[in-house]
Amino acid sequence: MKKYCLRIAYIGVSYNGFVLQSSTDNTVEYFLFKCLYACNLIQNKEPGDDYTRAGRTDRGVSSFGNVIALNLRTTIPKT
């Protein structure tokens, strides 16, 4: 595992915001973590203690430069 910072962009018109919500799975964060899990880059489908995000959006809002940081699986050795 190694800490990475990812800059993400998305069109939010079809989503109920960026941040995970207990009332719906239709958030950018839900689908982001679902994809990271499917690619075997993370161990759990939910964000862990190592996860941080900068910014948030409301329903229907798009973003060009949200930033997240989290540990991802990698074959690159730690330096």
Image: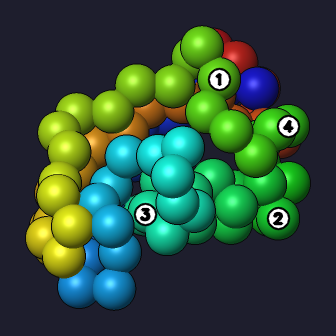
Camera-near label (3 vs 2) is: 3
Identify the amino acid type marked 3: Val
Element type at mark 1 = loop
Tell me which label, 4 or 1, sits earlier in the chain: 4
- Give the quarter of the figure containing the C terminus: top right
Inter-mark Cα distance, 4 to 1? 9 Å
Identify the amino acid type marked 2: Ala
- Residue that appears at 68% across and 39% down: 46
Characterize the local packing of mark 3: few (<14), some (14-19) or many (20 or more) Cα atoms within 10 angstroms.
Answer: many
Image location (x, y in percent) of residue 77:
77, 26
Q: Is residue 45 left or right of residue 68?
A: right
Q: Which mark is residue 43?
A: 4
Tell me which label, 1 or 2, sits earlier in the chain: 2
- Give the quarter of the figure containing the N terminus: top right
Characterize the local packing of mark 1: few (<14), some (14-19) or many (20 or more) Cα atoms within 10 angstroms.
Answer: few
Identify the amino acid type marked 1: Gly
Tell me which label, 1 or 3, sits earlier in the chain: 3
Inter-mark Cα distance, 4 to 2? 10 Å
Characterize the local packing of mark 4: few (<14), some (14-19) or many (20 or more) Cα atoms within 10 angstroms.
Answer: some
Inter-mark Cα distance, 4 to 3? 19 Å
Element type at mark 3 = helix
Q: Which mark is residue 38?
A: 2
- Residue that appears at 21% across and 67% down: 59
- Residue that appears at 70% across and 18% down: 78
Identify the amino acid type marked 4: Gln
Mark 4 touches mark 1? (CB < 8 Å): yes
Q: Which residue is mark 3?
A: 28
Q: Is residue 71 above or below residue 11?
A: above
Characterize the local packing of mark 2: few (<14), some (14-19) or many (20 or more) Cα atoms within 10 angstroms.
Answer: few
